[in-house]
């Protein structure tokens, strides 16, 4: 299980182009605007200005998803957290938003519409929580 990262982006919500560019940076590990732009333009049906890629990278940096370093007059962007950490963080935030409803009856009413696999997953979560509580008490 991937633990939640200590450092978190300032803003979790991303637009489609931000998501796409972040995926490319995760794949490459560290990337220049040129490398990202070329990757996007591999699709012959895509048109995207080089400056648009730069602007999105700057926004992702401002939101806390990327850092930027300059090396030999070229800027390189790196992710601030792994793809797995981002997935865990987003799941955590979604769960908190769901639980913020704070009406147990409303939350429980969704159980009626769950399939068997979902119910098994909920049972596994409940068992994991029970185990964690027992370990804390020990």
Image (spheres, rainbow, N blue to C red):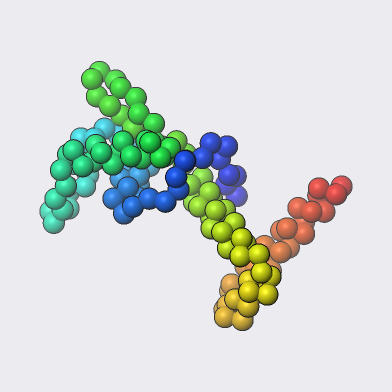
Whether residue 119 is visible here, answered yes or no, is no
In percent of the image, x 77 and y 59: which residue is there?
Answer: 130
Residue 74 relative to residue 107: left or right = left
**Residue 108 lies in quadrant:** bottom right
In percent of the image, x 25 and y 18: which residue is there?
Answer: 72
As displayed, is residue 77 above or below residue 21? Answer: above
As displayed, is residue 28 above or below residue 96? Answer: above
Whether residue 126 is visible here, answered yes or no, is yes
Pick the residue in front: 105 or 70.
Answer: 105
Percent across and percent down for residue 67 are 39, 31
Pick the residue in front: 65 or 81.
Answer: 65
**Residue 76 lies in quadrant:** top left
Percent across and percent down for residue 23 are 35, 47
As displayed, is residue 17 above or below residue 69? Answer: below
Pick the residue in front: 102 or 74.
Answer: 102
Q: In the image as oriented, which residue stretches furthest toward the right?
A: 138
- Please tell me how many numbered marks the rendered image carries: 0
In percent of the image, x 35 and y 29: which residue is there?
Answer: 68
Percent across and percent down for residue 64 are 43, 37
Residue 26 relative to residue 42: left or right = right
Residue 55 relative to residue 136: left or right = left
Percent across and percent down for residue 123 are 69, 69
In percent of the image, x 66 and y 69: which residue is there?
Answer: 103
Q: In the image as oriented, which residue stretches furthest toward the bottom?
A: 112
């Amino acid at each position: 299980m991937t633990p939640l990262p200590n450092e978190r982006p300032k803003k979790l919500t991303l637009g489609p182009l931000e998501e796409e560019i972040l995926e490319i940076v995760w794949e490459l590990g560290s990337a220049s605007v040129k490398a990202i732009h070329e990757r996007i333009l591999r699709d012959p049906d895509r048109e995207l200005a080089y400056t648009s890629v730069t602007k999105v990278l700057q926004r992702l940096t401002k939101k806390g998803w990327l850092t930027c370093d300059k090396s030999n007059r070229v800027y390189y962007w790196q992710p601030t957290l792994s793809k797995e950490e981002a997935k865990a963080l987003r799941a955590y935030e979604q769960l908190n938003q769901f639980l913020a409803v704070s009406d147990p009856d409303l939350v429980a009413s969704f159980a009626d519409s769950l399939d068997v696999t979902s119910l098994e997953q909920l049972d596994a979560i409940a068992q994991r929580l029970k185990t964690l509580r027992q370990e804390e008490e020990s």
